[in-house]
Image (cartoon, helix red, strand yellow):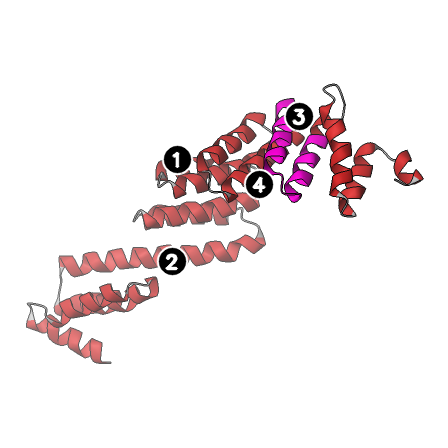
Amino acid sequence: MTSSELESPPLDTARHLAEQGDLEGAAAILTELAADPDGPDRAQAAVGLAVVLEERGDLEGARAAARTALATGHPEYAAQAACHLARGFEREGRADQARAAWQAVLGVGTAAYLPLAHLALARLAMQADDADEAERELAEVIAGDDPELAARAAQHLAELLLDQGDPAAAADVLLTALETAPGPEAPRLRVQLGIAHLELACAELATAVEEGGDPGTTALAIELLARTLPLRGRADDADHVWSYGLNHPDPSVADEVRLRHAR
């Protein structure tokens, strides 16, 4: 260790050693700091130790260090430690442990980390096919103060609503999100809004076909529906719509559809 390192605060020295690739040296300093229950740098050192030990491949040691930081209740470093634990569990596919760690982030209550935790809990809920829980978590992010994450949550919620067959609700979510979305997020929201409108169009056209009308209107609805469905990846459904129109029990409708299909 150089004389300048001896004069530096231990945390700075540990950080410098880690950046230089001396993970063992950094871990030694951080371990000592994290072991001092009265040390002012205990929480920060424990988080740093968790990162260093993970880089060395000591996952259990890293988790023990993160739990030490979490136990301090420090508003910044306890939240970081819980995030560290949660992400590690997610990478390993340990959903229950990841969920508990993200909930620990909420328990710390540091505002900057709450949207990340809610988004992660929504993601885990969607993986578990718990749509109601996912909606609740996404709504928390949308109602928060981070416009970028709120826009991202709105996209996820719209996807969920589209999957549930509720394009009108998805469109409402997206329109509201566009009012406050940062510039880079707006195009993605608009694309999703277009998708929602396509789904709405398909639903309206299908209803028009079912309700019937004069032959020209019914044939137009059949054509528009059949040409719109492939845009949503539903080419097989489009084929069924064409087949229905071409074999319609009303010969006038079938003739109109045949002309439209051929053009």
Q: Name the mark on residue 133.
A: 1
Q: Secondary structure at mark 1?
A: helix
Q: Name the mark on residue 146.
A: 4
**Residue 191: quadrant of the picture:** bottom left
Q: Which portion, as a residue range, is magenta? A: 45-73
The crowd level at tag 1 (other Cα within 10 Å; few <14, some 14-19, many 20+) is some
Q: Choose between 120 and 216: the one closer to the eye.
A: 120
Q: Secondary structure at mark 3?
A: loop
CA gap between label 2 and label 4 equals 25 Å
Give the label, 3 or 4, closer to the camera: 3
Q: Amino acid at mark 2?
A: Ile
> Where does residue 165 sit, x and y in percent of width and height?
29, 49
CA gap between label 2 and label 3 equals 44 Å
Q: Quadrant of the N terminus?
A: top right
Magenta span main SS: helix
CA gap between label 1 and label 3 equals 28 Å
| Residue 47 highlighted magenta (yes or no) | yes
